[in-house]
Amino acid sequence: MSLRPARAVWLIVMLAAPVHPGTPEETLQRALVRLRAESGNLSRYACVETVERQYFQPREDKAAACTAAPNRAGPLEAVDRLRLEVTFSSGHEIYSWPGATRFDSRDVSEIIREGPIATGSFGTHLQGIFDNPGVRFEFAGERQEGARRLLEYRFTVPLETSRYHVHAGSFNEVIPYRGTFRLKADTLELDQLTFQAEPPPGAASMCALDAELDYSPVPAHGDLLLAARGQLRIGFQSGRQTNNVTTFAACREYTANSEVVFAEAPPESTAAPAASRAPQVGLPIGLPVTLEFTAPIDSATAAAGDPVEAKVVQPVRRAGSADTLIPAGAAVHGRLTRVERHLLPEPYFLFAMSFNRLDWDGASHRFAARLDANAELMRRLGANGLEEEGGGLRHWSVGILLFPSGRDRWVVPAGYKSKWMTLAVRPRP
C-alpha cells in the first residue's frame, strides 16, 4: 500500500521533466535548427502589418528618455497609425500598400516618409539572429512563469553582421544590437525576443532604442513563426520618446502558381480595371471638383495605406466650356496617407489622402487633385508646420482634413463633401 503514493510522486516528477534534456549548448543547437527552418518558411507568406505610433513630449528630466521605459515618458503628444503588406525575400522584408497588385522594390523609408519606422518584426530579426554565424550566444538561466518553464539565452549582433535597419528623420542606417530570447522548455518554441541598440545611434540624436517581440502560433498556419505583437521604443537626446506597436493579420500563403512581383515605381492605390478603348481624359490644373466620401473614415481603425473612395458630386468642365471632362457620379480612388490624433498643444484629428484614379462607364482614367488645409485653422491648432512636415505632405497631390476635437475618436461620415482643385494630368496612352 505504501508504494502507491511514492509511484504517484515519481510520475509527477517525470511529467515535469523537460522533453529535451541536455546541456544548455546542446539545447540551443536543437532550437537553432528549428528556428532556422521556421524562419525559412517566411518567404511563402505575406501578412498585413499595422503599426500604431505614439509620440511623447519631453519630461523636465530629459535623461529619463534615455531609459526608453514607457513609464518614464513625458505627456502623450500625438498618435498615428499606418498599414502595409509585408513579405520576406532574399533576406529582406519588402512592402506594398494593402491591396496593391505588386510589392514595392523601394526601401520602407521611401514609402513611409515621416516618423520612426524599423524593419525586422516580420522576419529579419529571426534570420538576422538565428541564421547568422556572426552572432554570439550565452545561456542566461531558467525561469518559471506559472506552469511554463522557460530557457533564456543572451545574444550579441555586431555591426559587421547586423541586418537591423532603422529609419528616423534623416538617420537611415544598419545598427548593432544585443538582447535575450526565451524558449519554451518542453517544445523549444520561441516565446519572446528582446533587444537594445548597442551603442545607441547618436547620429540620429537617439540615446536609447529597445524592442520586445512576443511570439505565439498563427492559427491555420502551423509552420509560420510570427510575432503576435512587437514594440519598439526610442528615446531621443531632446527628451522626446516614441513607441511603435506592430501587429500582423490576414496572413496568406502563396500557392505553387503564385509569385512575388516587384514594382519599379510606386504602385497604384488599388488594382485598376482592364484598360478600356474609351478615350482617356486629360486634365488641366486648377479646375474645382467636389468629392463626396462613399464610406466613413473612422480614426479608431483607419490607417495610412488604407484605400479611400469618393464620387464626383457635380460635372467638371473647363471654364467657359459646356464639354464635360468628368461626369457627376464618377468614382474616385486613392489612399489615406496620414491618420493622426493630436493632443497637445490643442486636440485635433488629421486625415490626409491622395487620389490617383477615376472610373466611369467601364473606363479607368488618371486623376490628381489637391485640397489645402484651412490655414486659419492650422494656426489656431498650432499645426502651422504641416506643409513642411512629413514626406507624405510634401507631395503635391494630397488633401488635408482637420477636425478640432477633444474626443477619443472621430468619424468622417459617408457623404462628407470637400472641394479639391485638379492637377495637370496627361491622358493614359
Image: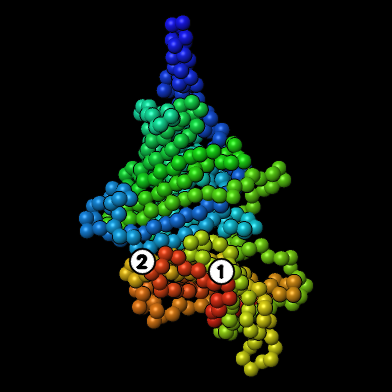
Check disc 1 and report the residue beneath it: 296
Residue 73 in percent (x, y) is at: 30, 54
Q: Position of residue 91 (x, y in %)?
A: 53, 43
Kind of element beneath mark 2? loop
Q: Earlier in the sequence, mark 1 or mark 2?
A: 1
Question: Which residue shows up at 52% across the image and 52% down it?
Answer: 49
| Residue in the foreground of this view, choosing between 110 and 82 | 82
Note whether residue 105 is visible: no
| Callout 1 crowding tier (Cα within 10 Å): few <14, some 14–19, many ≥20 | some
Q: Amino acid at mark 2?
A: Leu
Q: Which residue is mark 2?
A: 343
**In the rendering, at what x and y percent does residue 411 appear?**
50, 69
Q: Nearer the viewer, residue 300 or 102?
A: 300
Q: Residue furthest right?
A: 277
Q: Is residue 329 above or below residue 30?
A: below
Q: Quadrant of residue 291?
A: bottom right
- The residue at 30%/60% (across/down) is 75
Name, please, the residue furthest toward the front. Answer: 1
Give the residue at x 60% y 61%.
267
Residue 314 visible in this rendered orientation of the protein: yes
Looking at the image, residue 145 sits to the left or right of residue 279; the answer is left
Color theme of the render: rainbow
Disc marking residue 345: none
Image quadrant in which the C terminus is located: bottom right
Identity of the residue drawn at 66% across and 92% down: 321
In the depicted structure, whether residue 291 falls above or below residue 243 = below
SS at mark 1?
loop
Q: Amino acid at mark 1?
A: Pro
Q: What percent of the width, then of the height, locates residue 109?
A: 47, 57
Q: Are marks 1 and 2 in contact (CB under 8 Å)?
A: no
